[in-house]
Image: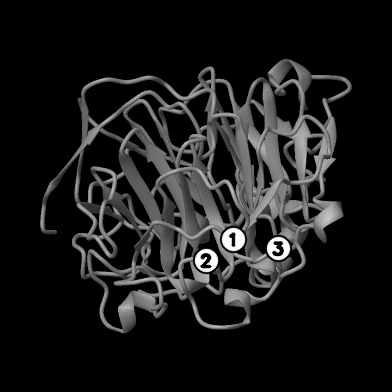
Amino acid sequence: MTHMTMQGHRLDRLKRFVPDFVFRGAVLGVVCIALAACNGGGGGSSSGVATTGVVSFSNGQAADVVIGQPDFTSSSFATLGSVHGNPDVIGGVLYLPDYGHSRVLGFNSIPTSNGAPADFVLGAPDFSTSGTLSGATSVTDYDGRLYVPELTNNEVAVYDPIPTAATSAPNAASPQTPSFTLTAGTVGGFNVPAFSVAGGGKFVVPDAHNHRALIWNSVPTADTPPDLVLGQVDFTGASTNQGGSPDAQTMSNPYGVWTDGQRLVVADTYNHRVLIWNTFPITNDQAADLVLGQADFTSNTADRGGSTAANTLDRPYAVWVDGQQLFVADTNNSRVLIWNAWPTSNGQAADAVLGQPDFTSSSSGTTASSMWSPSGLYLYGNQLFVTDTNNNRYLVFNGTY
């Protein structure tokens, strides 16, 4: 199916599998982000750049580079389509999931100019044909393997070794294909696995429409069953909030995830909150230790039932942690919230915001300083990548040390 044909189907496919994004639409502060070594999770679990010192971003700061569009005011479904999930950078090579075209685009280096073309593609024979990684969302790597959730195929494709320009289309005569797929078949299978993450020897997949997160205590090297489940009492449960009201053990359409093998963060999207485990779970249905976006574990209204603020969320879709700093894609508020230190209290307010001029604004836009339903994050050195879903692009924000 060509790009032109895909365009006519993109909204129907988007609404079937991802949150029903509400399309709506500064006080200058400085985001001082002390970066630690990336020792796990979020999309580049074993390949992050170890950084020291402080990286600063201003509230409402404009992005420096756009990928997928020729400029910051364009948003056509063309080079990229309805992009979702976290990017990954492995040894300086950038991997971008392209949901709308069922493929992953590769760049041999981080683009420094707007609209830079990709160097290679995974899942497709060339750049003009849609691929077979059906609904590719988010990418993560671990121990020389690349994991790509296929949201519409309800599986995770695994490449071993990680593909490069030399082993991928259009350069290779026989492009590398996935070594195996992870299916969770012994526990009912996946139902919309939009993200996966590997860190500290652990592997986690939020199984959104089964309202649970599946945990492997060792990163899979074959299609093995998970060891633990969160959000449900056992592997047979599949009801939102376990068929009742929200609490510290339930989930409703969880999407984003991050772990370093010691801590765990899950975007509990339809409960409008982020759940945090300060120690990695060891039992089924283990309760979270902390909640953001709500005052307590039993509340679950968008923006706490009121106006957008520094302590509210409206369908958060993605999370990312580097050291002690937490980044959350607050999707329906078209912004990224940043906590400069690891949160310690329920409902704790964020310290900074990107995509909006202040904490009370929530309109969408197509400029260098605005977004439209962001759904992915990745921090690489002093560069923050934001997946700007409904603008069909990736934004790159350069911080300063």
Residue 319 image offset from top left, x and y in percent:
44, 50
Badge 1 vs badge 2, beta-carbon distance below 8 Å: yes
Q: Is residue 385 visible?
A: no
For marks 3 and 2, the one nearer the N-term is 3
Residue beneath disc 3: 234
Placement of 302 over or under 338, stated as above or below: below
For marks 1 and 3, the one nearer the N-term is 3
Q: Nearer the viewer, residue 389 or 210?
A: 210
Residue under the point 82% across and 33% down:
222
Mark 3 vs mark 2, CA separation in Å: 12 Å
Residue under the point 53% across and 47% down:
281
Residue beneath disc 2: 249
Mark 1 vs mark 3, CA separation in Å: 7 Å
Q: Nearer the viewer, residue 317 or 216?
A: 216
Residue beneath disc 1: 285
Q: Amino acid at mark 1?
A: Asp
